[in-house]
Amino acid sequence: MKNPTVVSKSLRVQQWREFWFYFSASKTAVAGLIFLIGVVLMALFADVISPHEPAEQYRQFAKVPPAWKDGGQIQFLLGTDYAGRDMWSRIIHGSRLSLLAGCVVVVLSLSIGVLLGLVAGYRGGWLDSLIMRVMDTIMAVPGLLMALVFVAILGPGLLNAMVAIAITYTPSFVRLTRASTLTELNRDYVTASKMAGARPMRLMFISILPNCMAPLIVQGTLSFSTAILDTAALGFLGMGAQAPMPEWGTLIAENRDLMLSAPWTVTFPGIAILLAVLAINLVGDGLRDALDPKLKRS
């Protein structure tokens, strides 16, 4: 007779192998994952990697072009901005703020969305109608516009921008969780749990929620990339992170007047946003292929 613990561990290993098999079938997803891991490591070890402090000013080297261009300096690989600050160091430290913003937005919106979606789907009735009508109202307004309204009320700042963006993302998680909950409620294992006397809280969070996680993980990954974009957009509009914080959108806003005279000051932060968002989207596509049984290839 096999030990149940050994059997459970073996099953988990088999599930991870199956997941990696389908995920790694997409070479672009693997490439995106490798690049994303690099960005995360860069953010974690920014203090070690960056050659200069992000706010350190070298006035005598203001608007120095990248090192490979005429007039460039080797100590300023991607050039400097109007205040003589090293662009490479500011982009490295900006990855911390952008990734942090994406994580906070996804965690907040996912947590609230899952809770409301589970309650709406499980309870039904007037409570379901009330929650969904509120979500429909939020979704009726363009996300970035609503985020701007909330930030205008709360005041400019990175924290308020993250909260505002999280509010606009919550309805998508509520709707997805509710739909998955309604599907799972008709499963035999839920009926058996009810007959065994399981309480509603146990049914929702122990029985139903784990079986709803696959689409939520995919949605959370894709929302992570759009959260970085929206945070950068609010920073560019002056409603997100405030200077001298080196958030990527704020870096572009700080140097937009130099777009023609010193284009590298806006080009490189823009490329950083592009590559990070692309990598996250590629990972999200790979997760969708690996977690959705309908998309798995035989």
Image: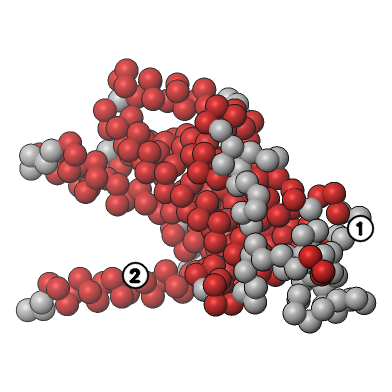
Quadrant position of residue 65: bottom right
Q: Position of residue 253 (x, y in %)?
A: 74, 48
Q: Which residue type does callout 1 highlight?
A: Ser
- Where 271 sits versus 255, above or below? below
Q: Position of residue 212 (x, y in %)?
A: 35, 48
| Marks 2 and 1, the one that precedes in the sequence | 2
Between the C-alphas of marks 2 and 1, the distance is 55 Å
Disc 2 marks a residue whose amino acid type is Gln
Q: Is residue 169 visible?
A: no
Task: Work out which quarter of the rendered image holds the N terminus and state it.
Answer: bottom left
Q: Residues within 10 Å of mark 2 (few under 14, many from 20)?
A: few
Q: Is residue 101 visible?
A: yes
Left or right placement of residue 204 versus residue 88 in this view:
left
Please identify the quarter of the rendering in which residue 69 is found.
bottom right
Element on which disc 2 rests:
helix
Residue nearest the viewer, comparing 215 with 18? 215
Residue 80, placed above or below residue 248: below
In depth, the one of 296 and 36 nearer the eye is: 36
The residue that appears at 7% across and 43% down in the rendered structure is 196
- The residue to which callout 1 is attached is 261
Measured as percent of width and height from the top left, residue 184 is found at 30, 42
Image-based side of 291 in relation to 46, left or right: left
Residue visible at 44% across and 59% down?
Answer: 291
The quarter of the picture where residue 121 lies is top left
Neighbourhood count class around disc 1 (C-alpha, 10 Å): few under 14, some 14–19, many 20 upward: few
Its colouring scheme is secondary structure
Location of mark 2 (residue): 15
What residue lies at 17% left-to-right and 36% top-to-bottom? Answer: 200
